[in-house]
Image (cartoon, rainbow, N blue to C red):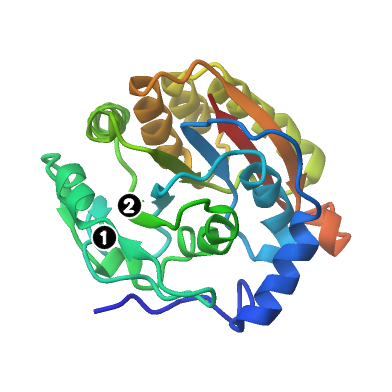
Amino acid sequence: MKRKPAVAGTFYPARAEELRKLTDLLCGEEEGEKLNAKAVLVPHAGLIYSGKTACAVYKKVKIPPKAVLLGPNHTGLGSDISVYGGGAWETPFGDVEVDAELVQKIASYQRAEVDESAHLYEHSLEVQLPFLLRYAEKGLSIVPVVLGLLDYDTARDFGRHLGQCLEGEEVLIVISSDMSHYIPAEEAKKKDTILISAMERLQTDELYLKRVQYDITMCGFIPAVVGIEAGKVLGIRQGILIDYTNSGEVTGDYDRVVAYAGMVFV
């Protein structure tokens, strides 16, 4: 059975023509030569808030035929490592097929489960599809993975397993995460800089520890640990910050923002 959109009409327009116009507005003109990134980190708020940062990343990298989408579990449904094993995902731009063979390889990790429940209402992966479809060069198939609050060792080890599963594949790892939530913009930037620095240097233990130590409300830090560790297996050497913004730039309220980072890993 196909996976129906959960947030079309709220996080982004449900009609293809309206969505196309919005992504045109957010993405602007094409840029120069694109990077061969192994992984990216992009935000997942409503497109009017975070879409410009997301698109700043997507239009800078080559989008291969496959993408593994890593997002946090906002609903509490499903398992701690939930690999979607159902039918295609419906979007306003058409259906996106799920790579069933890759699903089984990734779900062979001992704590992973093939599960649809964690994905039914989860927005963090769904909102990436309009951008991926816009820039995919040869069509697109996906493997959606929703992650709960894993301990560091499990997140690191699953990331390494994921990287091994992806060796030899033409694939992009998409880490879906917003940064600090509901604090003043200046405080958010100060805190987020700590975690961005760790990600630039691929230090996932530091990312995990300091997120907890300094109570930084980055919601996708588990997907970031997993995605960066997988990327290291695939040969990434650094993370590069492409854009950093916050919701105040749209709402005008800088006293209580959600912050967004866009990064590429090469």
Kind of residue indicated by mark 1: Tyr
Q: Residues within 10 Å of mark 1 (few under 14, many from 20)?
A: many
Residue 148 is left or right of residue 135, and the answer is left
Q: Position of residue 227 (x, y in %)?
A: 40, 35
**Residue placed most toward the observer, 213 or 29:** 29
| Label 1 element class | loop
Residue farthest toward the right in the current orientation of the protein: 252
Q: Label 1 to label 2, Cα distance in Å?
A: 6 Å
Residue 165 lies, with reference to residue 182, above or below; the image says: above
Q: Position of residue 112 (x, y in %)?
A: 18, 47
Q: How many marks?
A: 2
Q: Which mark is residue 145?
A: 2
Q: Earlier in the sequence, mark 1 or mark 2?
A: 1
Residue in the image at 45% along x and 25% along y = 209
Q: Quadrant of the N terminus?
A: bottom left
Q: Which mark is residue 84?
A: 1
Residue 130 is left or right of residue 22, and the answer is left
Q: Position of residue 243 (x, y in %)?
A: 73, 38
